[in-house]
Amino acid sequence: MCPRITPVAVGEQEQDDAWVLAFDGWDPADEGRREALCTLGNGRFASRGAHPESRADGVHYPGTYAAGIYNRLRDELAGEVVETESIVNLPNWLDLRFAVGDGDWVALSAVEVGHQRVELDLRRGVLSRWLTVLDDAGRRTSVHQRRFVDMARGDLAGLHTVVTAENWAGRLRVSSGIDGAVTNAGVARYRSMGSRHLRVTEARQAAGDTVLLVARTTQSEAEVAVAARTRVAGTPVTARVWTEPGRIGHEFVCELAEGGSVAVEKVVALVTSRDVAVSRPATAAVQLLAGAPDFEVLRAGHETAWAALWRRFRLDLTDGVGTLPAPETLRVLRMSAFHVLQTVSLHNVDLDAGVPARGLHGEAYRGHVFWDELFVLPMLTLRLPGLARSLLRYRTRRLDAARRSAREAGHTGAMFPWQSGSDGREESQRVHLNPRSGHWIVDISCLQRHVGLAVAWDIWQYHQATADREFLADHGAETLLEIARFFAGLATRGADGRHHIRGVMGPDEFSSRLPGRVGPGLDDNAYTNVLTAWVLQRAGDALDAVPSTRRAELQEQLGLGAAELARWGEVSRTMYVPFHPDGVISQFEGYSDLLELDWDDYRSRYGDIGRLDRILEAEGRSVDDYKVSKQADVLMLFYLMSADELRALLERLGYALPPEAIPRTIDYYLARTAHGSTLSALVHAWVLARANRENALEHVERTLLGDLADLQGGTTAEGIHIGSMAGGVDLLQRCFAGVETREDTLWLNPHWPRKFGRLTVAVQYRGQPLTIEVADREVAVAAAPGPGPAVRVGCGAEIRDLHPGDSALFRAGCP
Ligand code: BGC
């Protein structure tokens, strides 16, 4: 279970606790979750928090992943040859084992674990472990380890180990290696498929204290070099280099007096052929280590880099949220921000990598990039806009691939893939395994064309927040226009004079086809149709926002003439949106004809019904037949837009959205949603909070605790859920503190419940660092001193120009 602490007023001690995530004991059933939550990374690469002596054995799973390093393998599944691209589990650099006397290498499963505590220091990015083991002969050995993945120098990592012979004297052997014989075996459901992505091409001693292992991915031919420098202090040792197939390392033998210790310092460099400023990864890795200082010096630099990051991402609370006391709320928020920043950091600016839905923390979803950056970018854009820009470049660089996909499917414009990997083609699986029934199911989730709308949304929001005209002119506008063109092309005029989009899926993955219909997909998914109207309007805005010369160039290059623009305008005014007779927006055309599910019956029979799709399939039924959503679909509209914005958009389409229709729509879908995705709690928390509803807090808590408490029943072990982690932080910032960027102004419209105390967040707007403090409906903003122009900050009807060094106090309108 997640560590809880007793509710207290937040003093210094508690503030310190709120930086630490601690796990006691050794619990084989929980190791996977702990490893994912204790992952250390720096955006370039990350390693799970597996114990250094462990190997993949069903309990432990050491995994190291580098952003953007994928490989494809072929398999035969359900009679079909399928090709799958996966993020690659790279050589395990942590490998560090010890043995007492002539005994076996210590494995936790084979000894008595007297004591174990693992602490993740979120402030410093350091994972510490204290372990005491007892062997059959009664010898007690203790181990203290600290490790980090360098946030300052993106290609380095360190592991420091002190082994103490507590009640014995004699020989201790320590092995420090690099294990290149690893496979992708982290997700049980994928284990019947190919898993060997690496071929070790070189393993040698590179210097007296350094070994080097080089591996190549089998298809993408990415080269990965890992060099490990191990130094031992505290006692005389003899050292030798050992090799095994796919592995290499040093073995040290030392004689310990009773109570004596040995300190083993391992510093590692990991370089890939996709890195910048590298000739040959092997040469670079060895050179890096030759010049690298020792563990403590590197660690200090790494901690300084984290301190700088935390200044940008400052988040403080005096009281707790919901039933979570303040230190626990703070800890989970910091943990969320920590894992987001370990997945995407400033090091990504030099990489061509997107936002993998499960972080760099495990192999679920094969490291693919979905639409989750929609939930991640708001947290980043207001603090590290350069990083947000580089993540958007991952998409804009794949514009040609999206154009190709559209063309091949008989469409125009750009069709972004539902699951994206290395080169931007569609990576969604075509069949997936239902672990409950053992059946392979045809998978058509790639019909979630709305991912393109999310890309356009992200580009536009980034533009609003940063006014980065260069990005819009050079990359953003072209991508947005091609997305608009794709959706305009999907829309066809019906006999009713309105435009319809047929054969797609909305965000709710439980609804993929109409009962009885031969073809896949749904008609007129409200979310897709409304956002199509939105993107077609933004296309015009984007053309207006770039310099006229660039506009002319874009129109010429894209062959975008007046007639096509006029059609876009028309489609944007005539999209069809389905409604139920009582004014509730219908998820798609025909939704109201679906069957109602007996929720109580399923809850009582199955307990956790998050994956009703799997439950119903195993019962020989289809989730498509029921009014059952995995996650928010219609309600996504209320997540992305304020009620006023949505109302204006619908009115432009000729539909009314009376105020009473909003709670009715929320209640309708809330009653029919299984929350089988962590994104669901986030969106519901947001929508309910905006509607001032009491039950928002339940969903806020579910969002915050999603991975910590592994609320999706075992999925955290396979990787964190980055969308809900970033979304949890964003909930406080944008939803509750009401921070918004539009009309060249940073707007503050707090909906911060008085009982939550005082919230302090740091943001950066148009290059100006700001500290925002919210208490109840009062909000204070302070601009950091320094050079630069004033920024506009608004609250209600009041707008102020804030110069560097200025501060302002606003009182939002009455709740
Ligand atoms: C959700 C998607 C999400 C994906 C990756 C799925 O379970 O349904 O909306 O993009 O997970 O996080």
Image: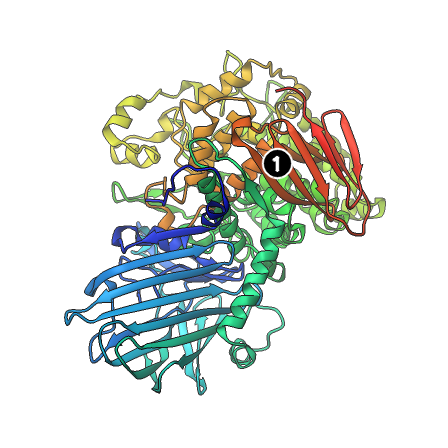
**In the picture, residue 807 is in which quadrant?**
top right
**In the picture, residue 647 is in which quadrant?**
top right
Name the amino acid type tagged 1: Phe
Q: Residue at x 20, y 65 (%)?
A: 111
Residue at the limit of the structure toward the top, as seen here? 582
Task: Report whether residue 298 is seen.
Answer: yes
Q: Which residue is mark 1?
A: 487
Q: With 111 as the anchor, is 163 left or right in this view?
A: right
Q: Residue at x 49, y 66 (%)?
A: 220
Q: 10 Å neighbourhood of mark 1: few (<14), some, or many (≥20)?
A: many
Task: Report whether residue 225 is seen.
Answer: no
Residue at the limit of the structure toward the right, as seen here? 549
Q: Position of residue 359 (x, y in %)?
A: 47, 52
- Callout 1: helix, strand or loop? helix
Q: With 204 as the anchor, is 637 left or right in this view?
A: right
Foreground pick, 366 / 312: 312
Up the image or down, 703 lies above or below 153; here it is above
Q: Position of residue 39 (x, y in %)?
A: 43, 57
Foreground pick, 354 / 2: 2
Q: Residue at x 37, y 79 (%)?
A: 249
Q: Quadrant of ligand 1?
A: top left
Image quarter in which the N terminus is found: top left
Up the image or down, 715 lies above or below 202; here it is above
Image quarter in which the C terminus is found: top right
Up the image or down, 390 lies above or below 160; here it is above
Q: Position of residue 166 (x, y in %)?
A: 26, 71
**In the picture, residue 38 is in which quadrant?**
bottom left
Q: Position of residue 48 (x, y in %)?
A: 40, 59
